[in-house]
Image (cartoon, rainbow, N blue to C red):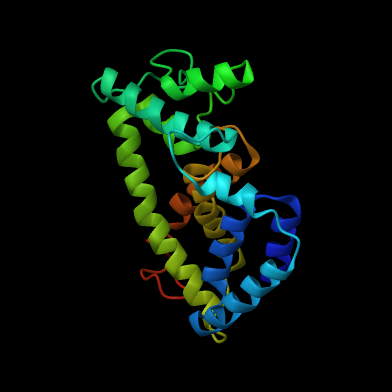
Amino acid sequence: MVLLGYATALLLQSLTLVVGTTLVAILVIPLRRFLLLAPVTALSILFADVNFDYYMGRLAISTDSQNLSTMVYLSGLERAYLNFKDTLGLGVGFQQFGITGSRGDIMESIRKLYGTDLNLLDGGAVAAKFIGEFGLLGVAMILAYLVYFAKSARWLHEVSMSEAAPRDCKRVFFLSCFVMYCIDFFIRGTGYFSPSGFLFVASLVWMDGSRGTQGQSTRPGRALR
């Protein structure tokens, strides 16, 4: 299934899907098997007709880049920083990212190259939008997310590695939604109101509701606190 995910990502030329598939592989495949799988995947990519320029253009994170995806991503980070600084850490307010506050030099470059303010309102990734709109509160909530991300990812990895551990299907589903939202947060996201955003909020509601009714440990088969 992991190889199928990589094949689909390469056929669709989607770096975001490559990152997501890699994250899933890390969670569900034992380290030894993952290390064996990596050379096979690399050889398959080398022999396949893959447009490496597409990926290199997006991985070359530089303010001099003229790759649209890279420029949009950097513009979101730049405007998050400028809004944070200009508002002294308060943020510009909910759903005001791109409407009020500084636009930044990279967004002006995008406008000159493409004739419009592409991704002005979403910033390319949810974390940039979150920081720009909520300032210090947004930073604190992202840090809290990272803490629970690490705990949830560890629990999912332990469950995947253990054949004897009972599998709570609801817990696996909601923690998977919670963990995979890191793609929207840090790689590519369209904003709060998206299908993945809905699943993320649903996972938060479930985690909060199950906290007091389940076990006390993060071991497989018990609750995550």
Question: Residue at 50% of width from left, 37% of height from top?
Answer: 125
- Figure quadrant of the N terminus: bottom right
Q: 154 or 124: nearer the eye?
A: 124
Residue 123, how many percent across, how many down?
Answer: 50, 29
Q: Is residue 112 above or below residue 139?
A: above
* Image-quadrant location for residue 36: bottom right
Question: Left or right of 112: which side holds 46?
Answer: right
Residue 43, how many percent across, how many down?
Answer: 66, 74
Residue 92, how many percent across, how many down?
Answer: 37, 18
Question: Residue at 34% of width from left, 55% of height from top?
Answer: 147
Q: 131 or 208: nearer the eye?
A: 131
Q: 98 or 47: nearer the eye?
A: 47
Q: Is residue 56 above or below residue 71?
A: below
Residue 3, how many percent across, how many down?
Answer: 69, 70
Question: Left or right of 44: which side holds 100?
Answer: left
* Image-quadrant location for residue 111: top right
- Figure quadrant of the C terminus: bottom left
* Image-quadrant location for residue 68: top right
Asked whether residue 107 is in view, the answer is yes
Q: 83 or 45: nearer the eye?
A: 45
